Structures are given as structure tokens and as C-alpha cells.
Image (spheres, rainbow, N blue to C red):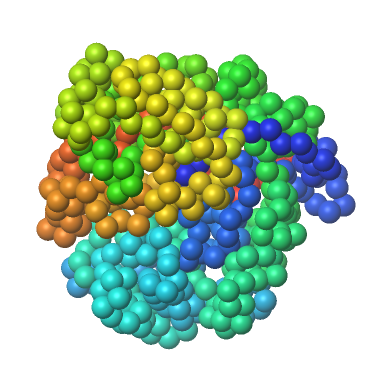
């Protein structure tokens, strides 16, 4: 899922009173089985309409159910009782809902979906995920302020029947519905909570496997306890999930080895060390890290040669080896490998064959393009700030990029601004940066989950790169080519190749997350949306 998959990695954190984990008190505990997992930062919000980051997204998947849930790579029914009835050439979906309850005992109804979806597209909500609704009848006009949210193509036929009307067929529609932006919301509870909805445990209502407890909105620890009202509670075998913010990789390794963490994500030296450990897992993620260049704030970036020069100044393989020190993959484009395939062809690899010169490390060509670009924009010695998180790994990454850009691009001075994760998100969204290290991971297994981001009017296009031809290709993939798989594939390839050639954003790497996980944990699946599904998971 998209949860602003602007991901974070390592920085020092002094830990006291770390929650006990299953390695020390699980099955023998009188309180039942539990595990403690590491998160790299705090939960920012539990409002499904406004969440943007991966950490909050995981917590929402733990505590809520949409129409579907991923179980590994398999898309399974969740609130949808059965497969929908699809009519009108793929433009109308009718879902039958199962009997389910909210954690306060209220029934989950079709109207809960209607309310939630309307709330998300309502401009006043300021949801950055409202664009995902594009293609649902009237969604575009609603987000543009031209129509009322009540006209959205979603209706409650009765308490257990939900009808969705699309403007045109969307081939990936069902896979989108695992995103929290499509989760139901209890209207009475949301209205009563007001602006406090989703801000602390008191103002959260769950219909999923767990309930979030002991969360004050900012804390570095939290607890998710089994939701006994969950429709599938019989398959929730781990009683408690404990969250612990750990920003430093060495600290994470120490906590794992002392059995105070059961799942730990590592970078740098600890990642290299973990590869030889029996608990090692390399999780290849549908997640790409990239540089965004702010064309609105710094018109210098409107020059294609300048953008290309920055890209060609970066030795991605050396960066991975020297800084990340893990199994991550140098990115030739923003669409990750393994995300989208057709007849055995990998979309990302196919696009790379056609257009990858702009991401090839070539200092001489970079210098040439940089010099020409500066002359064209009338500058000679620009100073640019690189914005990133305040974590150890993020700082090391910024320092590497600062060094290589200044070394290969004459006259350039790069300063670094390190800020907390939530601040970086806010500054990115508000355009308060020159360059920023961003990241994204898939909402659903389709290239459009990435390529859609960089259309001119997308709320996540923080760098404000704009290309009319690119916009037209993305629109074509959603309309004219929507029901023709081959035509759609070819159109998206053209869009990816154009984005790469122009370096609308500068791709850096696809993350392969070095993870340590207790062997006592079984049945825990990792999903295409780079999230865990704890339903069916057990602790031995």
C-alpha cells in the first residue's frame, strides 16, 4: 500500500524498558503469545483517509479490514463475503458483505464504506490518496470541487450490499481495495471524535484482527491486542503485537540478540553481519528510493540536462555497497522489479532495456550536461539543500550524495537538512525543499501504482515535474487501453521510458530489506504491498 512509502532507516535511540518479546515470554506467558517488532519511526495517524506512511499503514492493516486482504501474494476476501458481481463491461461491481462487527459492537455495514469513501474524496479531508479513486464515477469532479462527495459512484443497496460504479473499467480495481483509503469507517464514531479521530487509541475503532492500545499519538511504543469481535478471530493466533521504535541499526541488532525484539530490520554493517545468521530473511520489496527535484522552488530543475547530470553523477552500485551494505538493487527506473509482469516479462527490466542511459554512472557526461544546463539557465554556482530524515542511514546516504554531486558537478554546493520523519513528509508535501530523498512502495501489484505519482496534478508529485506527453500516456492506460492488456502494457512502457529519459525523478535503488525474524514465528506472510499479514501467523 502506498502509505507514503517514504521509508526511513537507522539513528541512535536510547531505549529503556523495552517491551518483552516472544523470545522470552511468549507461549509460557499467562497473557498469551506475543511478539515485539521494530518500527523505524512513530505512527503518524490512524485515520484511513489521511494516512500516508508505511508505519501507519501497517498498523491499519493490523487493526482493520477492507473488502480484501493479502495473504502473501494471494488476494483473499475480507469484508467481501464472496467475489463481486461485475456487470456493464466491468464498470459496475456489486459486493456482498459478511456479517462483521466493529470493536464497539456495532455492525459493519455497506453504509460504512459509502461514508468512508465519500469522506476520503471530499476535498475538505485533504486526503493525498483521493486520486486513487480516479475512475470511480464522479471522483475526479469531486476532488476538483465541481461536484458534491455524495455523487460518488458508491451506494449501499442495503446493509450488506455495496454497489460501486466506475467511469470506465479498471483492470486492477480489486487489488486497490487493500489500501486503507478504501477501508470502512463508522460514521457515528468518526463524527463524534471530530478532529481527534485517529489521533490516539481512544479515538480509533477497529474491525480487523487487532485493536491498537496504549498509543498516545506520539509514543515510541504501542500494543495491538487481539480483537475478539473480529469476524476471523479464530485464525488470529498471536494475542499481542508490540511495536517498538528503533532508529539505530546497532541498537536493533543488540535488542534482537538479547531477545527483546522478534523482528528487526537492519542496515549497514549490521545488515552485512545478519546475512550469515540463521534467522536472516532478505525481503525484496516493491519499494523504490529516489531523489525529487523541486522544479517549482528551483526553476533550475526544469532543465532536463540538469536533472540528467545529477542522475549520471551517482554510482548506484557503489552507494549500495558503501552505504547500505545490503542486498538492495540499483534502480534503473522508479518501477521496482518483480512488481508487474506479463507473459513472463518483467515490466521494470523491459523498460530498462529500452531506456537506461540516464541512470548510468558517467561523470564525464554528467559534467558536460551540467555545464550546458547551467549555461542555458544562466547560473554558474548554485547552492542546493538536500532534505532527508534524521536517521543514521538517511544521514549517511545524504552525505554520500552530497559528496558525489559536488565532486562531479563543477560549482555545485550541496547542504544537508536532517529532520524527523514526520517533518520531512510535511516539508516534502509543502514544497519546502530543493532536493529530497523520497521513497514509494506499491499500493497494488501494477506499474501504475508508481507511474501515476508523477503526473502533473498528482498530490504526491512533490517535485512538480510536468510533461504533457507523459500525462496523456497515463490517461490512455486508464481509459482507451484499460481493457486491452497488451495495449496498456505498451503504453505504460512508453510512459516509464519517457520518465526515465527525462529524469522527472532520479531513481536510486530498490530495497531488499535485511530482516531478522525468530524461527518460532510461523505462518507470517509478507505481502506485495510490503506489509505483514498477522492473520494465521503463530508463535511456537
Q: In percent of the image, x 68 and y 33: which residue is there? A: 12
Q: Looking at the image, is 115 positioned above or below residue 476?
A: below
Corner quadrant of residue 420:
top right
Q: Looking at the image, is 89 positioned above or below residue 408?
A: below
Q: Nearer the viewer, residue 133 or 12?
A: 12
Is residue 261 visible in this depiction of the protein? yes
**Image quarter (top left, top right, bottom left or bottom right) of the C terminus:** top right
Image spot of residue 467 (x, y percent): 18, 47
Q: In percent of the image, x 26 and y 38: which residue is there? A: 300
Corner quadrant of residue 162:
bottom left
Corner quadrant of residue 418:
top right
Image spot of residue 20 (x, y percent): 81, 42
In the rendered image, the residue lying farthest to the bottom is 158
Q: Is residue 492 left or right of residue 423?
A: left
Q: Nearer the viewer, residue 239 or 347?
A: 347
Q: Nearer the viewer, residue 481 or 418?
A: 418
Q: In percent of the image, x 65 and y 36: which residue is there? A: 247
Q: Is residue 97 left or right of residue 379?
A: right
Is residue 226 visible in this depiction of the protein? no
Q: In percent of the image, x 51 and y 37: which residue is there? A: 417
Image spot of residue 125 (x, y percent): 45, 71
Q: Is residue 171 left or right of residue 238?
A: left
Q: Looking at the image, is 347 positioned above or below residue 407?
A: below
Image spot of residue 117 (x, y percent): 41, 72
In the rendered image, the residue lying farthest to the top is 364
Q: Nearer the viewer, residue 153 or 138?
A: 138
Counting every numbered tag in the picture gives: 0
Amino acid at each position: 500500500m502506498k502509505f507514503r512509502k517514504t521509508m526511513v532507516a537507522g539513528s541512535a535511540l536510547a531505549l529503556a524498558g523495552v517491551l518483552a518479546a516472544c523470545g522470552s515470554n511468549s507461549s509460557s506467558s499467562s497473557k498469551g503469545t506475543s511478539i515485539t517488532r521494530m518500527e523505524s519511526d512513530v505512527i503518524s495517524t490512524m485515520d484511513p483517509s489521511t494516512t500516508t506512511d508505511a508505519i501507519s499503514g501497517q498498523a491499519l492493516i493490523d487493526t482493520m479490514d477492507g473488502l480484501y486482504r493479502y495473504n502473501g501474494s494471494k488476494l483473499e476476501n475480507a469484508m467481501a463475503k464472496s467475489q463481486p458481481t461485475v456487470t456493464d463491461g466491468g464498470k459496475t461491481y456489486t459486493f456482498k458483505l459478511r456479517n462483521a462487527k466493529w470493536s464497539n459492537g456495532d455492525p459493519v455495514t455497506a453504509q460504512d464504506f459509502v461514508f468512508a469513501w465519500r469522506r476520503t474524496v471530499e476535498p475538505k479531508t485533504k486526503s493525498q490518496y483521493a486520486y486513487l479513486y480516479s475512475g470511480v464515477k464522479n471522483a475526479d469532479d469531486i476532488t476538483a470541487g465541481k461536484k458534491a462527495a455524495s455523487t460518488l459512484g458508491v451506494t449501499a443497496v442495503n446493509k450488506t450490499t455495496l454497489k460501486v460504479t466506475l467511469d470506465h473499467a479498471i483492470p486492477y480495481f480489486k487489488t486497490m481495495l487493500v489500501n486503507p483509503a478504501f477501508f470502512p469507517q463508522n460514521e457515528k464514531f468518526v463524527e463524534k471524535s471530530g478532529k481527534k479521530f485517529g489521533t490516539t487509541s481512544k479515538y480509533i475503532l477497529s474491525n480487523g484482527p487487532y485493536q491498537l492500545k496504549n498509543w498516545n499519538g506520539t509514543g515510541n511504543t504501542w500494543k495491538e491486542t487481539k480483537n475478539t469481535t473480529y469476524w476471523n478471530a479464530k485464525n488470529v493466533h498471536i494475542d499481542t503485537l508490540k511495536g517498538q521504535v528503533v532508529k539505530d541499526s546497532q541498537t536493533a541488532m543488540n535488542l534482537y540478540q538479547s531477545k527483546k525484539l522478534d523482528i528487526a530490520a537492519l542496515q549497514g554493517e549490521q545488515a552485512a553481519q545478519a546475512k550469515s545468521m540463521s534467522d536472516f530473511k532478505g525481503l525484496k520489496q516493491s519499494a523504490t528510493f529516489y531523489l525529487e527535484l523541486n522544479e517549482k522552488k528551483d526553476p533550475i530543475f526544469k532543465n532536463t540536462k540538469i536533472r540528467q547530470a545529477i542522475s549520471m553523477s551517482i554510482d548506484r552500485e557503489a552507494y549500495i555497497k558503501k552505504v547500505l551494505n545490503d542486498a538492495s538493487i540499483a534502480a534503473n527506473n522508479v518501477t521496482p522489479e518483480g512488481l508487474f509482469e506479463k507473459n513472463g516479462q518483467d515490466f521494470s527490466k523491459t523498460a530498462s532495456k529500452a531506456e537506461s542511459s540516464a541512470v548510468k554512472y558517467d561523470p564525464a557526461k554528467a559534467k558536460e550536461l551540467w555545464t550546458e544546463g547551467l549555461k542555458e539557465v544562466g547560473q554558474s554556482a548554485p547552492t542546493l539543500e538536500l532534505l532527508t530524515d534524521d536517521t543514521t542511514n538517511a544521514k549517511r546516504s545524504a552525505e554520500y550524495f552530497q559528496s558525489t554531486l559536488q565532486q562531479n558537478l563543477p560549482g555545485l554546493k550541496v547542504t544537508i537538512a536532517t529532520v524527523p520523519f514526520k517533518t520531512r513528509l510535511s516539508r516534502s508535501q509543502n514544497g519546502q525543499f530543493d532536493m529530497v530523498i523520497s521513497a514509494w512502495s506499491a499500493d497494488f501489484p501494477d506499474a501504475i501504482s508508481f507511474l501515476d505519482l508523477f503526473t502533473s496534478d498528482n498530490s504526491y508529485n512533490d517535485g512538480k515535474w510536468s510533461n504533457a506527453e507523459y500525462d496523456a500516456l497515463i490517461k490512455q492506460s486508464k481509459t482507451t487501453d484499460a481493457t486491452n492488456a497488451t495495449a496498456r502494457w505498451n503504453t505504460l512502457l512508453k510512459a516509464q521510458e519517457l520518465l526515465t529519459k527525462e529524469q522527472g525523478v532520479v531513481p536510486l535503488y530498490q530495497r531488499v530489506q535485511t530482516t531478522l525474524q525468530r524461527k518460532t514465528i510461523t505462518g507470517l506472510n509478507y505481502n506485495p504491498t510490503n506489509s505483514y499479514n498477522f492473520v494465521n501467523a503463530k508463535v511456537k
